[in-house]
Image: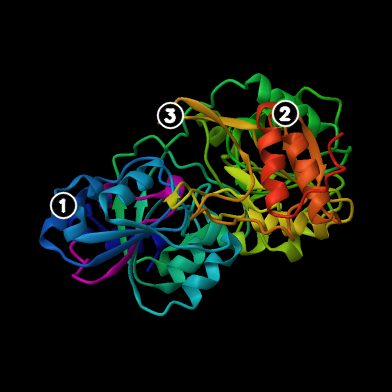
Amino acid sequence: MSYEEQYKAKLTTAEKAAAVVKDGDWVDYGWCTGTTVAFDRALAKRMPELHDVKVMGGILIHEPEIFRIEDPAAHFTWNSWHMNPAERKAIAAGFSFYMPLRYSELPRHYRDRREPLHVAAFQCSPMNADGYFNFGPNASHMAEVVAAAETVIVEVNRNMPVCMGDEKAWVHIDQVDMIIESDNPPIDALGKAAPATEVDKAVAELVVEEIPDGACLQLGIGGMPNAIGKMIAESDLKDLGIHTEMYVDAFVDMAEAGKITGARKNIDRGKQTYAFGAGSQRMYDYLNNNPDCLSTTVEYVNDARTICQLDNFISINNAVDIDLFGQVNAESSGTRNISGAGGQLDFVLGAYLSKGGKSFICLSSTFMNKKTGQAESRIRPTLAPGSIVTDTRANTMYIVTEYGKLNLKGLSAWQRAEGLISLAHPDFRDGLIAEAEKMHIWRRSNKR
């Protein structure tokens, strides 16, 4: 049977595909921009008659229709590998839960599943002449999802960019059980980043001056990494490489400015390597059929053993807050889940193992507490009760605020406290010193 004949034989409606879901099933909804749309819409109509369905996904950019049914918690739970705003709201509504992990481990979680994965449904590009569908900018762990699932449903979207990569970027029609042709909605775009603040620019300057020609970059998501990317695009740096879990618009800025060649990369030379991507339509257009970009599994991209092979590796990420011991929280506000561990620790570890490598955790010195209307320090004596330690004090390298930067490696507890307090807003330094004294991590001779 030809690929075209197989395609016709497996082609069905979203309603018939959703009918395969049963009470108690585990269902995978794809990842980020590959999250199902047509299947989700059909399953939402059925969900009120179902019970105890366990749905998995992550980095939702749009709110699934199943979230909008009456009393979702009575029918299913959403289990997220990484939280976004829609998922945070679902936690408050009682039907969403975070699954803690280091992102690099996610493919193995599918290989070693304790329970069957009954159904996997996700968006992909149209089938090519060789019978392959492309995962778009979502290779991540999707090949392992396909391998683990009892029923694989692909939702074809002609707007999905074809992201060039290795065998982990594709699924063959032989692996597919059902095909849905969607109404081709636009691929989810991240909201436009807010303009860089003066704080963002100050932090960016401190980081960019640490980047040498030929460095290999990883950027996290958010205004501060975007400000750093923009500054790099406008700098005199050259021959930079990309090896990042998430591909973001800042990399397009750098590439179009001629900063990205990958010529000095020790591995994947000349390629911009990434596990998934989300951004603007401009970014998706750039990734589409671009042979300079390599879409592949997060198991490879985020592995510290891969990262450390790249000389002068520069990892740049955000944090919610940090304490005077050097513990970094990048995923919660107390017990309130904000995002997830993601790959931050993977890159903190890998960058330090790289020859000439550096990892930077960037944050503003203060934030505005919306409840009190008062500014609070992001540098705290200890993390708030219930806050998650994303990077332990033993792993943290550079911390950067608008007041400076500090490499914590090799510093004693009192040196860390002294240095971190110097990065705090001046209004909070005396209070931090008093707390450091109580915790016996302050030398009285420090402040003169």
Q: Which residue is drawn at 57% across and 67% down?
A: 105
Q: Mark 3 points at which residue?
A: 372
Q: Mark 1 points at which residue?
A: 71
The local secondary structure at tag 1 comes to: loop
The image's colouring method is rainbow
Q: What residue type is labelled 2?
A: Glu
- The residue segment tinted magenta is 19-39
Q: Mark 2 points at which residue?
A: 402
Q: Which amino acid does label 3 sit on?
A: Thr
37 magenta-colored: yes
Quarter containing the N terminus: bottom left
The local secondary structure at tag 3 comes to: loop
162 over 306 or under it: above or below? above
Residue 380 placed where, x, y %? 62, 43
In front of the other: 61 or 430: 430
254 magenta-colored: no
User: Could you tell whether 111 is left or right of 296 in the image?
Assistant: left
Do we see residue 125 in this rendering?
no
* Numbered circles on residues, count: 3
The local secondary structure at tag 2 comes to: loop
- Cα separation between marks 2 and 3: 23 Å
- Cα separation between marks 1 and 2: 45 Å
Quarter containing the C terminus: top right
Q: Which residue is drawn at 58% across and 20% down?
A: 195
Query: Badge 2 local density, few (<14 within 10 Å), some, or many (20+)?
Result: many
Q: Nearer the viewer, mark 1 or mark 2?
A: 2
Q: Nearer the viewer, mark 1 or mark 3?
A: 3
